[in-house]
Image (tube, rainbow, N blue to C red):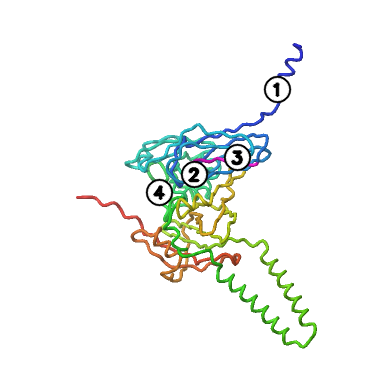
Amino acid sequence: MRSTLPAVLLLILACPVLGSVELSLPLEGYYRPGRYMPLRVQVTAEAGEHLIIAADHALPSRVELTHGRAEGVTPFLPLSAGLRQLRWHITGGAYGTVPSAMRMLAPDQKLVAFTTVDLTFAALLFPDATIIPIRLDAATPLPGHTAAWQTLDAVVLDHAAAVQLDDTKLAALLAGGTAIAVRTQVPPPNWPWTQVGDYQVLSRQPAGPPWAGVNAPAFAPVQGWEADWPIRFRTRVVLYAVFFAIVILALTLMRSRWAGAIGAAISALTVVLLALWWRGRAAILERAGQIIVVDAKLTQVDAWSYLASASPTNTTIAWSQLVHPVFEDDAARDAIGLSLVCASDGQPRFLAGRLLPGVRIASFSRSIQPRPLLKTDPAPDNAPLARLARRVYLRPGDRIAGQVTSTAQQKPDTVERWPTLVIHRAPPQPPTTQP
């Protein structure tokens, strides 16, 4: 008996763990409504297709499991105040909660991540604010998709850690409203850095909506839109009907005993062709366009999309750059049931939900790039994106420079694409001082 005991213990230790789920919060539970926060995920499960992380007042994240496993940093999106505790469950399996408490940041608090903590420098970036420091791993300072770190107000890096941030990651941080500071006297290439003390600083306050969530003014371009088919689609239907009518009318003029049979055959063929044309056609209608905001140094590109449907339909919003979902009101947010679907390594793939008649959803994908030269034409005052710009983009001194007709490849006829609107942003005014 004694001789078999070590062998039994070895077998027990060699057996795979039946299942484990480890979730942690790299930002120590701090969050801002409407901005993505990182969630570190490590899962080993016997079965299940998804790990679902949810909370009241937040957009659920669904992490796909590959052979029962997932590991990485995934974005999680709080939508409003009141986030208390995160819950998780594996489809058809285990469930639990994340023990860490959630803490909403106040307007005068700035969350700053450091590879080497330097509170004196952070106070230069954000005077009159309370700095909350977060320590980063110098080897992998911002793991996962960069959008997951949008809650950060600034990232302060040593030169060695900054090498890991390529132009794509820098652009993603800027698009999320996060300032980047690198401890070096030589500015990194390609971007308009500003020297502050021993650091090179890159920052830009985005124009337009700064975050996701409920934002009724953002639906100004689609006021009165009730999911009616675009003109291009309706024109095609009318042309098909006119062509069919001409053919049938021509048959009636034929003096042949076969005219009736031919007419019946043509009608049957038309029905089959229409069924094939309609087969697989999405019931979702889309209106879309871009707003480009240009200042003296950088260009912001916001790609807007509005979706509606005349019947209950599942919908997805592809992930591109930094995607923010926008809802008309709380009732629309709850009705759509949107969630963020991520791969097993935490990388976001798409947003998924269900559209109902009379309920619309918007999203904008934001990117930042060095300033290009654009030729514009005058923009009509009643242009849809001009209405959006006046409601949520323009600040004193800004102006609508015009519009650019899109040269992108033609999309399906269920999509109505607006011309790109260009805004010239006025330089920020220096603070006035009292004598």
Q: Are marks 4 and 2 in contact (CB under 8 Å)?
A: no
Residue 286 higher or lower than 81, as above or below: below
Q: Tell me which amino acid carries mark 1.
A: Ile
What residue did someone put label 1 on? 12
Q: Which residue is drawn at 32% across and 41% down?
A: 128
Q: Tell me which amino acid carries mark 4.
A: Thr
Viewer-closest of 342 and 328: 328
Q: Tell me which amino acid carries mark 3.
A: Leu
**Disc number for residue 194:** 4
- Which is nearer the N-term, disc 1 or disc 2? 1
- Disc 3 secondary structure class: strand
Q: Does the magenta stretch include residue 55?
A: yes
Q: How crowded is mark 1: few (under 14 residues within 10 Å), some or many (20 or more)?
A: few
Q: Are marks 4 and 3 in contact (CB under 8 Å)?
A: no
| Alpha-carbon span between mark 4 and mark 2 | 36 Å
Q: Do the residues labelled 3 and 1 touch (CB within 8 Å)?
A: no
**Disc number for residue 58:** 2
- Disc 4 secondary structure class: strand
Q: Where is residue 168 in the image (x, y as percent from the top left)?
A: 53, 50
Q: Are marks 2 and 3 in contact (CB under 8 Å)?
A: no
Q: Position of residue 366 (x, y in %)?
A: 49, 54
**Disc number for residue 125:** none
Query: Is residue 21 shown to the viewer in this render?
Result: yes
| Alpha-carbon span between mark 1 and mark 2 | 41 Å
What are the residue bounds of the magenta stretch?
Answer: 49-57
What residue did someone put label 3 on? 51
| Alpha-carbon span between mark 3 and mark 1 | 27 Å
